[in-house]
Amino acid sequence: MLRILLVATALSLVSCKTDVKEDSASIEQSDNAKSTDNSEKENTPVIDKKDLVVIENGTFKEYYSNKKIVKFEGPQDKNGKRNGKWQYFSESGVELSMTMYRHGERHGHSIVKYPNGNLHYTGEYSNNKQVGVWRTYSIEGDMMNEVDYNKL
């Protein structure tokens, strides 16, 4: 009986070593594939971000690389800091977030949405700190959590 147990243990150790060798070989192949992908990325032309940003009449706009869809948009104060309603849009033009700013600090209402358009979370800022009641929602739109930052 003891002999059978020793043989079974030895066989399981040998099979584990084989699995580890196979796993490390597949990891090496994966790493080689990643390095190939990286070299391809290095050869991809990079669009100069200066061409994608427009500041006109105190309003900042950053575009996606297609230069047709706005990525970020909002007013700036005289020092170039965010000041007022700032929005972030998906590449398809759907508003994904809106946050109010005052001279570079988040101050006021903030809404962040999932890519499907449903609310992700919403709340208020005061001088860059969360205040009041913040609500978090599931991707399906069900409220998942509510935190009152005034009570923390």
Image (cartoon, rainbow, N blue to C red):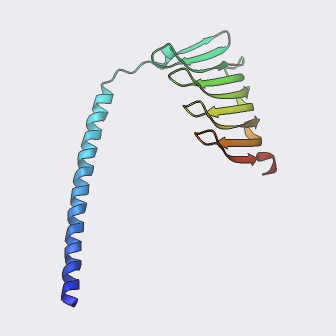
Query: In the image, is residue 145 above or below residue 108?
Result: below
Q: Which quadrant of the figure contains the N terminus?
A: bottom left
Q: Tell me if residue 111 can be seen.
A: yes
Q: How many numbered marks have been drawn onto this rendered protein structure? A: 0
Q: Quadrant of residue 118?
A: top right
Viewer-closest of 126 and 138: 138
Position of residue 96 relative to residue 9, above or below, is: above
Q: Is residue 113 above or below residue 21?
A: above
From the top left corner, tell me how far across and down residue 16 is, in percent. 24, 67
- In this view, the residue in front, 133 or 126, is 133
Query: Which of the 4 image quarters holds residue 54?
Result: top right
Q: Residue 128, position in %: x, y?
A: 72, 36
The residue drawn where x is 42% and y is 18% is: 47
For the question of whether residue 82 can be seen, the reply is no
Residue at coordinates 59% horizontally, 39% vertically from top-left?
Answer: 140
- Residue 123: horizontal and vertical position, in percent? 73, 37
Looking at the image, residue 14 sits to the left or right of residue 119; the answer is left
Left/right placement of residue 14 relative to residue 42 reads: left
The front one of 118 and 107 is 118
Image coords of residue 58 (percent x, y): 68, 13
129 left or right of 89 in image = right
